[in-house]
Image (cartoon, rainbow, N blue to C red):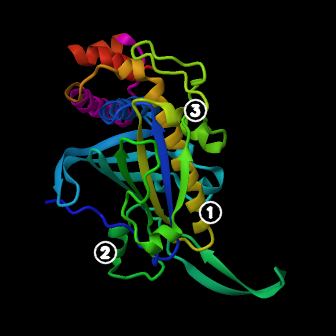
């Protein structure tokens, strides 16, 4: 039996809690197909021999609360996506995110941890005319790629040791985003939680839209050829049929003295941009995935995992039809040609 990581409590210092509600013009079963297709296609588009996604593990799991589902572990090498203020602090190998995901649709939990770790050595330094203070503190930051081996070899416990933690708990419901407290938060958690409705017709325009990507869909004129859905005009969430909502509870803890708060806000903005772009793609690509089955996507996902690992471990870039045909056969080949098209 698998034990999923617990939710951070509000009492733990430096915890940000925000719930994003994303309404989608599709049914729960359609969203399951759309999401799987979208994840595979976006991963293929963003992965090359230097950066992108590497699948470490993909297997079934069973949990008392979530039931049976699929567990995945992935590495995200995102050096070029990080904001400049962070890249000046951290070396390249410190900008690798490890993601664990437990998908028991319509419930899902994702945990991201990064060894963006440091030992802080605080020195008292005499100073004149700096912020009207005669004493300032200097912090030496040492980034560690493998914190476990670092401390085990030295047999030490460091009071300044800290780890970035991001948890995303998702519940999908067949409604238009009006359900309250679907995550079962207590009174303190509800008081700390912020709620934001995301409208997929409104693309992001900040730094993260560049880092994550920004599709050119105009849903005010978009119309699906296969389903006839669209365009999405003002107030579409109230009139859409079918309709469903992804309730995403994001909890972030970045206990880093001096820049933890800034890092938390940057991560929240990054998650929001990713939610916007991925869900815009889910609907924008509807004519590519509509009609596919979960079984077809499972086969496609397994083959796609192999392709991702090949691309990121050696200089192999599959960008044309001949490349795809040399790797895949059967019905899945047709879908993959659509799925990794850039």
Front residue of 69 and 101: 69
Asked if residue 27 shows in the view, the reply is yes
- Asked if residue 241 is among those painted magenta in the image, a careful observer would answer no
Q: Decide if residue 118 is on the left or right side of residue 302.
A: right
Q: Secondary structure at mark 2?
A: helix
Seen at 60% across and 67% down, the residue is 261
Query: Which one is earlier in the sequence, the residue at label 3 or at label 1?
Result: 3
The answer to whether residue 278 is above or below residue 177 is: above
The answer to whether residue 58 is above or below residue 219 is: below
Tell me, for residue 326, which label it has, or none: none
Please tell me how crowded label 1 is: few (under 14), some (14-19), or many (20+) other residues with Cα within 10 Å. Answer: few
Tell me, for residue 152, which label it has, or none: 2
Expressed as whole percent of the image width and height from the top left, the position of residue 213 reads 55, 34
Expressed as whole percent of the image width and height from the top left, the position of residue 3 reads 21, 63
Expressed as whole percent of the image width and height from the top left, the position of residue 277 reads 52, 36
**How much space separates mark 3 and mark 1, taking CA atoms?**
28 Å
Q: Decide if residue 42 is on the left or right side of residue 326.
A: right
């Amino acid at each position: 039996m698998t034990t999923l990581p617990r939710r951070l409590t509000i009492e733990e210092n430096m915890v940000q809690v925000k719930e994003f509600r994303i309404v989608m013009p599709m049914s729960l079963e359609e969203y399951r197909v759309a999401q799987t297709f979208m994840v595979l296609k976006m991963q293929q588009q963003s992965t090359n021999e230097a950066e992108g996604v590497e699948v470490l593990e993909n297997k079934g799991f069973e949990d008392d609360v979530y039931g049976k589902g699929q567990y995945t572990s992935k590495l995200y090498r995102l050096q070029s996506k990080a904001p400049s203020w962070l890249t000046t602090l951290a070396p390249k190998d410190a900008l690798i995110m490890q993601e664990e995901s437990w998908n028991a649709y319509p419930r899902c939990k994702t945990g991201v941890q990064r060894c963006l770790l440091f030992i802080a050595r605080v020195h008292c330094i005499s100073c004149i005319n700096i912020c009207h203070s005669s004493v300032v503190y200097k912090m030496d930051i040492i980034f560690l790629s493998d914190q476990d081996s670092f401390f085990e070899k030295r047999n030490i416990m460091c009071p300044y040791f800290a780890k970035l933690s991001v948890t995303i708990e998702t519940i999908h419901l067949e409604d238009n985003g009006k359900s309250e407290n679907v995550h079962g938060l207590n009174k303190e958690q509800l008081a700390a939680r912020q709620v934001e409705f995301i409208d997929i017709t409104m693309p992001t325009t900040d730094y993260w839209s560049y880092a994550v990507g920004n599709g050119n869909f105009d849903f005010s004129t978009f119309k699906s050829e296969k389903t006839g859905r669209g365009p999405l005009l003002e107030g579409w969430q109230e009139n859409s049929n079918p309709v469903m909502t992804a309730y995403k509870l994001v909890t972030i803890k970045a206990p880093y003295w001096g820049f933890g708060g800034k890092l938390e806000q940057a991560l929240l903005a990054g998650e929001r941009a990713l939610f916007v772009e991925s869900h815009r793609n889910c609907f924008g690509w509807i004519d590519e995935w509509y009609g596919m089955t979960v079984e077809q996507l499972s086969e496609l996902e397994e083959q796609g995992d192999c392709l991702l690992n090949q691309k990121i471990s050696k200089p192999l870039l599959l960008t044309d039809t001949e490349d795809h045909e040399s790797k895949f056969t059967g019905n899945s080949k047709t879908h993959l040609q659509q799925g990794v098209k850039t």
